[in-house]
Amino acid sequence: MVDTFNDIKKLSFEEALSELEQIVENLENGTIDLEKSIEYYTRGSHLKSHCQQKLNDAVLKLEEIKVSADGKISKKEIE
């Protein structure tokens, strides 16, 4: 696991989610010491926030797309 949290911003949604899943697995396993558990939990919290932001951004992009009555797709202007 990388020591810095700034690298999280560079991760794609899929990369962040994969790492978060690994952290959850390690925490659920219960074989790591308390200090490492705290480190994992903290990083996992940052990864969760990053994933949530990526999802929020995706929703905004989808909301920009409009479909007219005749089925034509256009992009809504951002105000």
Image (cartoon, rainbow, N blue to C red):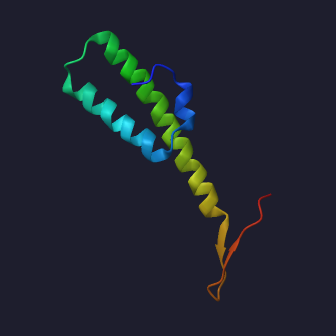
Q: Is residue 33 found left or right of 68 in the rendered image?
A: left
> Where does the image place residue 69, in percent across and percent down from the top left?
65, 86
> Where does the image place residue 28, in percent across and percent down from the top left?
23, 28
* Number of marks in the rendered image: 0
The picture quadrant where one finds residue 42 is top left
Q: Is residue 67 found left or right of 44 in the rendered image?
A: right
- Depth check, front residue: 15 or 77: 15
Q: Residue at x 43, y 42 (%)?
A: 15
Q: Is 72 located above or below residue 65 in the figure?
A: below
> Where does the image place residue 22, in percent across and percent down from the top left?
31, 34
Q: Is 61 located above or below residue 22 in the figure?
A: below
Q: Residue at x 37, y 16 (%)?
A: 38
Q: Tell me the quadrant of the picture where the C terminus can be found.
A: bottom right
- Depth check, front residue: 22 or 60: 22
Q: Residue furthest bottom?
A: 70
Q: Tell me the quadrant of the picture where the N terminus can be found.
A: top left
Q: Residue furthest right?
A: 79
> Where does the image place residue 27, in percent across and percent down from the top left?
27, 25
Q: Is 22 located above or below residue 63 in the figure?
A: above
Q: Is 61 located above or below residue 51 in the figure?
A: below
